[in-house]
Image: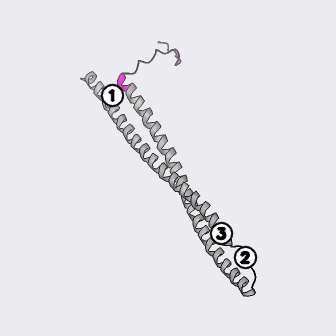
Amino acid sequence: MAELKVVSASESSPSPARSVERQALAAAIESRDKADRAVADGAAAVERAHALVAKRSAAVAAANIAVDDARSKDAAATAAALRRGASVPFTRARAARAEMAAVEDDFDAAVAAAAALDEQQQSRAEALAAAEIGVEVAITGVLAAAVPAMV
């Protein structure tokens, strides 16, 4: 009766070296996976940027309402002071407009950041498409190298 010997992975014969074509395929897959991760990370950044734009857009709308409200209150306070013959009070609208300018600056920065991230994401998507083509080309190379061996 034949004896069976258990061989561990470290005792087994070394695996044959990968062909140049298979090495190219492995490199192409690694490149594609890296590009895919970059697209996913970029998509998350784009999503955060667009959420920030929406938040800051709402802040601009609120600041506009605050300016309108301050102007109305200023008009009422000024009219009341003039009826009494008193000095005209400090205007609240000036402070509200200053706040609105700051909010608009924040909004503009968010819009610019979102546009830049959108552009970068397009570049990442193009790089991923190129990497996917590279995988297909490498697969073709592996298959082409295998055909003579099959004949």
Which amino acid type is shown beneath numbered disc 1?
Answer: Val
Closer to the N terminus: mark 2 or mark 3?
2
Q: Residue at x 61, y 60 (%)?
A: 102
Label 3: few (<14), some or many (≥20) within 10 Å? Answer: some
Query: Is 58 situated left or right of 80 in this image?
Result: left
Q: Whole-Å distance between the Cαs marked 2 and 3?
A: 12 Å
Which amino acid type is shown beneath numbered disc 3?
Answer: Arg
The residue singled out by tag 2 in the image is 89
Residue placed most toward the observer, 11 or 1: 11
Q: Residue at x 61, y 65 (%)?
A: 100
Label 1: few (<14), some or many (≥20) within 10 Å? Answer: some
Residue placed most toward the observer, 138 or 150: 138
The residue singled out by tag 3 in the image is 94
Residue 3 sits inside the magenta stretch: yes
Which amino acid type is shown beneath numbered disc 2?
Answer: Pro
Mark 1 or 2: the one toward you? 2
Residues in magenta, as a range: 1-22
Q: Residue at x 74, y 79 (%)?
A: 87
Label 2: few (<14), some or many (≥20) within 10 Å? Answer: few
Q: Residue at x 49, y 48 (%)?
A: 43
Q: Quadrant of residue 63?
A: bottom right
Q: Residue furthest left?
A: 151
In the image, residue 59 above or below residue 2 = below
Closer to the N terminus: mark 3 or mark 1?
3
The residue singled out by tag 1 in the image is 142
Give how far across and how far down residue 72 sits, in percent.
64, 78
Residue placed most toward the observer, 125 or 63: 63
Assign the magenta stretch its main secondary structure.
Answer: loop
